[in-house]
Amino acid sequence: MKKMMLLSPGPTAVPDRVLKAMSEATIHHRTSVFEEVFAQAREGLKKVFQVSSDVLILASSGTGAMEASVSNFFRKTDTCVYINGGKFGERWGEILRAYGVNAIEISVEWGRAAVVEEVASIVEKEKPAGLFFQASETSTGVRHPTQEITKAVKEVSPDTLIVVDGITGVGVFDIRPEEWGLDVLVSGSQKAFMLPPGLSFLWASEKAWERANDSDLPCYYFDLKKEKKQQAKNQTAYTPAIGLVLGLKESVSMILEEGLENVFNRHAKLARAARECMKALSLELFSEVPAEGLTAVKSPADIDGQKVVKHMRETYGVVIAGGQSHLKGKIFRVAHMGYVFESDLLAGLAALEHTLHDLGYPVEFGKGVGAAEKSLAEG
């Protein structure tokens, strides 16, 4: 028997308090009991998203909310621009094209952040119906400058809807949709929300909802106007993921009890410590602008990154993630989002030191962990 620790960028660890809530007897969703739970979960979500209007809860992975962001707010004749700086930026383009929308790619080298001036220039030229990008590109560990991009785009093309994937951003670092002028923000349950996979979340501005009235793209299960109407009554259009909603009520309560600013500071502190560990081990960070939710690291030249992932999991019980697409074998990713605290990170970094040693990389035991401890002590 081996105890497993999740330091992967999804799914993340689920607190006992949330597991207990989800283990309660199943309630029927067409009852006042469910409506009360749903109302509390919805109210908590608004606070975590830092918005004054409703956040929709969908029974899907985060990709479902991404797809709904396309199918509900755009038209077949629209041109949209998306930033492809990783696997999930690439996904925006795939979804847009699946719905027949003319999709123009802004290609960003994986590991680098989007350049605000370049994005604004292309948007000014194309005047697209929408701009799609990630607040945090999970596949590369890069944080894109969401506020700066939004401000620049609004100045050159005010009618362009700003659609942001915050799946590894919301609840990790500060994102202020209404204050910054975002139009759609999505997230998912299995990241900072400390839940199993299965729920996605979507907030839309008044401007986006007005655009939804003109959309001619097909949607049925992800018909957000229907869902919005039902959720305003604390119900759902279709059968919800009841157990996950019970857990969501508890997880947002935990986040708000800790305090959003404290949550953001904890993630930033853990991220700094992880980066200091990698530097002390003479490992090169992959991300030019690292996100707070995970740290992407270049695997040593003579070691396959996938072997690092497998050995840590099978030998030391610590689950991290490898690279995706052309980065497979070239990087590994250590997450520190959600239900992760200092002791968890330090244990994971110690396992990484042992793994690298086992695979033939020269390691001075404790050097990386010590650098992380020093960083944590300094705050």
Image: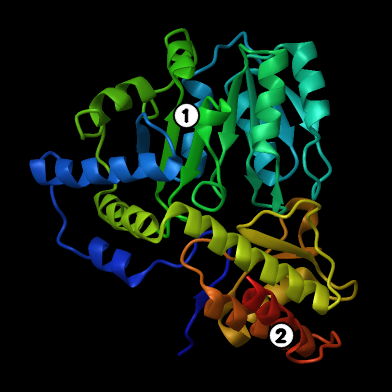
First in sequence: mark 1 vs mark 2:
1
Location of residue 315 in the rendering, given as x and y in whole percent from the top left corner: 62, 87
Residue 205 is marked as none
**In this figure, which residue is indicated by the disc labeled 1?**
68
User: Quadrant where the C terminus lies?
Assistant: bottom right
Colour option used: rainbow
Q: Is residue 223 left or right of residue 89?
A: left
User: Residue at image x 76%, y 27%?
Assistant: 105
Location of residue 49 in the rendering, given as x and y in whole percent from the top left corner: 44, 41
User: Residue at image x 37%, y 54%?
Assistant: 256
Q: Residue flagged by tag 2: what amino acid is it?
A: Gly
Q: Residues within 10 Å of mark 2 (few under 14, many from 20)?
A: some
User: Residue at image x 80%, y 47%?
Assistant: 110
Q: CA distance from mark 1 to mark 2?
A: 45 Å
Give the answer, above or below, for where 38 lies relative to 163. below
Count of marks placed on residues: 2
Residue, far front: 378
Give the answer, above or below, for where 214 lies relative to 309. above
SS for tag 1?
A: helix
Location of residue 179 in the rendering, given as x and y in whole percent from the top left corner: 53, 29
Q: Which of the 4 image quarters holds residue 335?
A: bottom right
**In this figure, which residue is indicated by the disc labeled 2?**
370
**Do the residues under discs 1 and 2 have CB atoms within 8 angstroms?**
no
Q: Which of the 4 image quarters holds residue 35?
A: top left
Q: Residues within 10 Å of mark 1 (few under 14, many from 20)?
A: many
User: Residue at image x 52%, y 32%?
Assistant: 177
User: Quadrant where the N terminus lies?
Assistant: bottom left
SS for tag 2?
A: helix
Q: Residue flagged by tag 1: what amino acid is it?
A: Ala
**338 or 218: nearer the viewer:** 338
Give the answer, above or below, for where 146 lies relative to 71. below
Q: Is residue 344 left or right of residue 33?
A: right
